[in-house]
Amino acid sequence: MEEEESKNLEKLVKWAANLGITDSSSSTTNQNPCLSSSSSCLSHTLSVSNFPENGGRGLSALRDLIKGDLILRVPKPALMTRQHLMEHDHKLFLALHNHPSLSSTQVFTVCLLYEVGKGRSSWWYTYLVNLPRSYDVLAGFGEFEKQALQVDDAIWAAEKAVSKAELEWKEAKKLMEELKLKPQLVSFRAWIWASATVSSRTMHIEWDDAGCLCPVGDLFNYAAPGEEPKGFEDVKGLADDSRSLLTDGWFEEDVNSYCFYARENYKKGEQVLLSYGTYTNLELLEHYGFLLNENPNDKVFVSLEPNMYSSSSWPKDSQYIHQNGKPSFALLSALRLWATPPHQRRSVGYLAYSGCQLSADNEISVMKWISNKCHAILKNLPTSIDEDILLLSTINKIQDYSTLNELEKVLLAFGSEACTFLEASGLQSRKNGGELLVSRKTKLLIERWKLAVQWRLGYKRTLADCISYCDDISSSLSRRNYGL
């Protein structure tokens, strides 16, 4: 399998070079992309490498890079778009014309499946065989994986993602049948794959809100944007807070190419990353099928009483706990006002909205309320942080197992959730002239289970860190009050 993937990747970079895709900043891409003199599109700045602990296959720097350096250009003819596919296939064009009610992303998803159905005769075949064979997006989660998230908001998000995918699939099914797609390509499983490809790999273009698939450009792994802006403020047309736009790459009309730039300084051999925008870990799972152990944009929302929300004008989505455990500015402001007697709120409102503490007693009451709220949430969840850490360690261990007997032996000895996984997966340890090997499907289920446990563990750690933060503040203020 690895040898086959390596050969497919080698063919991809040669194919890409012939299309004018290049990592050389000196090449001109506004000329007709004829055969390149290089056998690879990656030889000057970037190289395909494997990063097991950080996204898997990605791109590394072949030389030291400075923030803002042009590192990759992909000419427009090499971008897969709805327009490109329809212009080169009259049958597809006519069929799509009869289904105007489908969204742009539904249409692009159908186009992708249609192109896959062509097999080796597709002009895009070399690119298509290098796409991931599966994705771990929320829409692909089964009932067990959804429940493994444990948190109601996360379970609801997964259920919503599945329902949305099913609805869009049913709406597009008639079109796929008219195009005479093979039965396996009309299946919901195929739809999840194609829609996840569109969701996780497309890049923003001005002329099509479905985006484009960008060969080689989609090999960059994700880096979460921090507090400092990573994009280029002087580039017109880039929205500051649009999740559909890349902050380190965009289409440039003057060179008729998608251009990518180094988001920071990189040393030779380091992984070169791309920021897709600001996402929480749950949003990363929903749209991309992965999460980050350290995501500065992650957050935990805590439900407040109606009178707490009404005590201030802060929107609900601004009241949360940061990944590091610190309550957001808006959450603190709202709770400080709530903890103030109603007749005094008007006089101290300007202080609360400016982020000031109103008094030591007020701050202590706010910190205690947040701490108690976090304690209550943790107490009501099925497993503790320590139990999740142990379970995650077990899942990491069984991912390396090759037979069902090994896998089942460990899980049966572990606990209820592991046994539920065995039941939900329909796994049985059987002898039939030898031990059954762990299938690819089983490995995918284990990976999604792992992601669910990782997500809920991060959620719980944020709550635990918030408890520590609030308790420290309360203790410090109490000591100060009593002159200790």
Image (spheres, grey):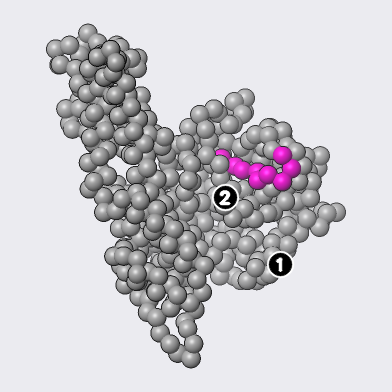
Query: What's drawn in magenta, residue-wise?
Result: 267-275
In the rendered image, residue 277, in percent from the top left (x then y), is placed at 51, 38
Q: Who comes first in sequence, dot 2 or dot 1?
A: 1
Among the 4 quarters of the image, the one containing residue 89: bottom right
Label 1 neighbour load within 10 Å: few <14, some 14-19, many 20+: few
Q: Can residue 61 be seen in this view?
A: yes
The dot on residue 330 is: none
Question: Camera-side residue: 246 or 341?
Answer: 341
**Crowd band around label 2 with a 10 angstrom C-alpha radius: few (<14), some (14–19), many (20+):** some
Label 2, label 1: how far apart the Cα atoms are: 23 Å
The x, y position of residue 395, in whole percent, is 43, 62
Q: Residue furthest front?
A: 484
Q: x and y percent of residue 22 in the render?
A: 75, 48
Residue 126 highlighted magenta (yes or no): no
Would you name the residue on which mark 2 appears?
Answer: 54
Q: What residue is shown with label 1?
A: 7
- Residue 114, compared with residue 348, is above or below; it is below
Q: Which amino acid does label 1 sit on?
A: Lys
Query: Is residue 301 placed above or below 15 in the rendered structure?
Result: above
